[in-house]
Image (cartoon, helix red, strand yellow):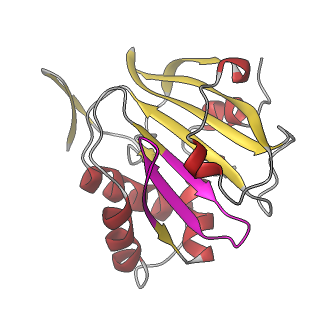
Amino acid sequence: MSLNFGSRSLPVTSRGFALAASFCLCVALTPVAAQTSAVNAPAVAPAALTGMPELKPRGGGLLRVFGFQVYNAYLWTPNGQAHDRTKPFVLDIEYLRNFTAKALAERSIDEMREQGTGSDAVYPKWLAEMQRVFADVKPGDKITGVVTPARTAKFFHNGVLRGEVNDAAFTEAFFDIWLSEKTSQGAFRKRLLGQSP
C-alpha cells in the first residue's frame, strides 16, 4: 500500500495514515517537523459552535510527514483550558493535500484498530457513518469535528454541516485517534494539548 502525494508515491510501512483525520486522519507516520501556535489558530466556523460553551484554541500547528505538509490542526477547548474528554471540544483540521472521504474513513478505522478501540462488530457501521459525514478534501479545505455536550460527533466541511453521529463510543474512539495516549502521533498530540512549546 502507498500514499500518493501529487506525482510521488510513498510506501506505508507503519500504522495507518489517518486523520486525518480520520478527519484525519492521515496520522500514521512520524512527522519530520511540526510547528505549534495556538494563538494563530484560524477561527472555527460559527455554525460549528452553535450550542457549545465558549471555546478557545488550546494547541496545534502544522503536521509534516517526510517533509510534506499534510494539515494544520487545532484543538479548541472550553476557555482554552486543559483538554477534558468529558467536556465538549472541537478539532479543526485544514488539509494541505487531497484525500477522499473513503480513504479518510478507512484510515480512521485502521487507527482505531491499532489503538484497540471498537471491534470488528462495529467497524462496518462506523465506516459507513464516516463515509456519510466526511467529504473529499483538497488543499485549503477544512473538516471540523465537534464533540457536543451530548457526546455526539458533528462534522463540518468548510463550515457546512455534513452530519452527526449519535454514538458516544464512536465519538470517543474517533477523537482518540489524535488525543489518546495510544495515538500513533505522540509528539503531535502533545502540541494539540498545549504541552509542547
Image-based side of 173 in relation to 89, left or right:
left
Q: Position of residue 135 (x, y in %)?
A: 31, 51
Image-based side of 82 in relation to 130, left or right:
right
> 104 above or below 63?
below
Q: How many marks?
A: 0
> 11 above or below 130?
above
Quadrant for the C terminus, please: top right
Asked whether residue 158 is drawn in magenta, I would say yes
- Compare residues 121 and 152 and report the one nearer the observer: 152
Q: Position of residue 77 (x, y in %)?
A: 77, 45
> 125 above or below 92?
below
Q: Tell me which residue sits at (32%, 58%) in the image.
A: 106
Q: Position of residue 141 (x, y in %)?
A: 37, 34
Q: Tell me which residue sits at (36%, 25%) in the image.
A: 96
Q: Furthest-left residue in view?
A: 7
- Compare residues 36 and 188 and report the one nearer the observer: 36
Image-based side of 192 in relation to 136, left or right:
right
Quadrant for the N terminus, please: top left
Which span of residues is magenta-colored? 144-163
Q: Position of residue 87 (x, y in %)?
A: 79, 60
Q: Main secondary structure of the magenta part?
A: strand
Q: Can residue 22 be spotted in the picture?
A: no
Asked whether residue 52 is drawn in magenta, I would say no
Image-based side of 150 in relation to 26, left or right:
right
Q: Tell me which residue sits at (64%, 48%) in the image.
A: 90
Q: Can residue 91 be spotted in the picture?
A: yes
